Image (tube, grey):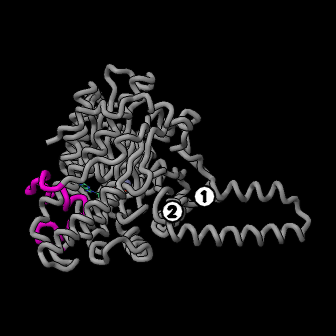
Amino acid sequence: MFWVQFFSRHASVQKILAISSVTRCTSKSVKHGQSAWLRSIFFNSVKYYPTKLVLGIETSCDDTAAAVVDDTGKILGEALHSQNEVHLKTGGIIPPVAQQLHRENIERIVKETLCVSGISLDELSAVATTVKPGLALSLGVGLEYSLKLVDKYKKPFIPIHHMEAHALTIRLINQVEFPFLVLLISGGHCILVVAQGVSDFLLLGQSVDIAPGDMLDKVARRLSLTKHPECCRMSGGKAIEHLAQQGNRLHYELGAPMRHHPNCNFSFSGLRSKATRIIMQKEKEEGLQEGHLLSCVTDIAAAVQHAVALHIAQRTHRAILFCIKSGILSQTNATLVVSGGVASNQYIRRALQIVTDATNFNLLCPPPRLCTDNGVMIAWNGIERMRAGSGVLHSTDGIRYEPKQGDPEDKARRNKDSIMLAKEIMILQSDRTEIGTTSAALSETRHPLPSPISPTPRLKHSNQWTEDLPSNDLEAARDLT
Ligand code: KG4
Ligand code: ZN
C-alpha cells in the first residue's frame, strides 16, 4: 500500500527523474537508472500493474523515434535515431533518403525501446503512430511497421496527429487543465491554437508561408553554418541560437513582419529574403563567394534570431489579448504552452516570457528534448486518447497516412489515387454496381481520420475578431534585449 501511495504521490518526481536522466543523441536508447531500479522493487513487492502502456512510434520527418509511456506519464524507455547529420550533408531532407534511413532503423529503435522499458509487445495496451502530417515516404514506414505489429500482436491502433502530440506533451510533465493556449513552432509548422480537449483545437492563427524552423534552417544553410567548427552537426535553428549568443543583433535590422495585419497569422519568408539580402551584401563587401563563412556570421545570426523572436512574441501577444477579450481564456490562471523544435530556443522563450509576464499568463514549455520530435510525445498522445476514449481503433482496415499538403510524393500519390478511383468507378459501372455508395465508401477510406486540428466556424471571421485589437499595443514584446 505504501508503495502504491508513494508512486501515485511521487509520479511527478519520477517524471523529473526519468527526464533528467535522459540524453537525446543519435541512435541512442535510454535507460532510466533510478526510476528503473525503483520500478523493479515495486514490481517485485506489490505487483503494480499500470492500467495502460502505450508504444509510440514517430517517423513523420527525419527522426525515427519510439517510446513506451504508462498512464501515470512515466517514460519506461525510449530510443531515437536522428538523420540530421545526413540531411545536413545533402543540404536538406531528400524524402527517399529519409525513407531509406527510417526503414534501416525502425525495427532496431522499437526493439531497443522495448528492451530498455522491460516491456514485451504482449504487455502493451496499444500502439500509437504518427499518421499525419509529414513526409509521405517517412510516414509510410512508421505506419507500415506499426500495422504489422498490431496485426501480429492483436493490439489496438491509435493514429496520431503530429501537432496534437506536440500540443499535449506538456500534460505529461505538468498538470495543465483544458483550455490553454498553445503555440507550436517547428520546422514544418507555426500555429496558435486553443486546446479545448484532447482532440479539440480552436485555430487562431498560422504561418501564411514557411515555418520558423524552415526559415532558420534555410538561413543557416545560406550562411554555410555546417562549415563553422562550433556548429557543424547542429540543426539550422540550433546553430543560429548558438552563434547568436556571441553576436550583436543591433548591427542589422530585419524588422517585424505583419505589424498591420489585424489577425494572429505569421509570415517568415520576408525575413528570410531580408536575411539573404544582408548576406549577399556582406559577401560582396568581404569579397567572398556563396558557400564561405562570413566574418560577421554571429551578428547576422543574432539579428535573425531576434527578428524571429520578436515576430513570434508579437503575434502571440495578440492571440493572448484576443483570448482574454473574447472570454475564451480567463485572465486569471491562464496558460500559454509553447512546443515544437523551435521552442527549444531559449531566446524565443525569453521573448515569450516577457509577453506572458505582461499579461499574467503562465508560460510552460516542455524540456528541449521533448520539444523536438520524439517517441514520448506520440506514446503520451496515445495515453491521452485512451483515457478520453477517442480514436482507439480495433480494426485498421483502410487506415492510411496523410502527408503535409504540397509534399511532392503526396501530389504523385493523389494523382495515382484519382487514376485508381477512376478505374474502380469504370469497373463498377461495367459491373452495374451501385456507384454512389461504393465511391462514398472509397472516399471515406481516403480520409479515415477526423482532423483533430480543424477550424471551427468561429475561425471563419478571424480578421473581424482581431481587427479591433490595436496592432501597436504590443510594447511588451518590443523591447527585447
Ligand atoms: O519539431 P521538430 O523536431 O520537427 C518538426 O516537426 O519540424 O522541429 C525541427 C526544427 C528545425 O527546423 C530546427 O532547426 C528547429 O526545430 N530547432 C531550433 C532549435 N532546435 C531545433 N530552432 C531554433 N532554436 C533551436 N535551439
Ligand atoms: Zn515536430
Q: Position of residue 204 (x, y in %)?
A: 45, 38
Q: In terms of image quadrants, where is residue 327?
A: top left
- For the N terminus, the quadrant is top left
Front-most of residues 329 and 280: 280
* Dot 1 and dot 2 residues touching (CB under 8 Å): yes
Q: Position of residue 145 (x, y in %)?
A: 49, 66
Measure the alpha-carbon separation of dots 1 and 2: 9 Å
Residue at (31, 69) in percent of width and height: 83
- The reply to whether residue 51 is in sight is no
In the image, 192: left or right of 392?
left
- For the C terminus, the quadrant is top left
Front-most of residues 73 and 358: 358
The label number, if any, that marks residue 399 in the structure image: 1
Residue at (43, 38) in percent of width and height: 263
Residue at (30, 56) in percent of width and height: 271
Highlighted range, magenta: 227-252
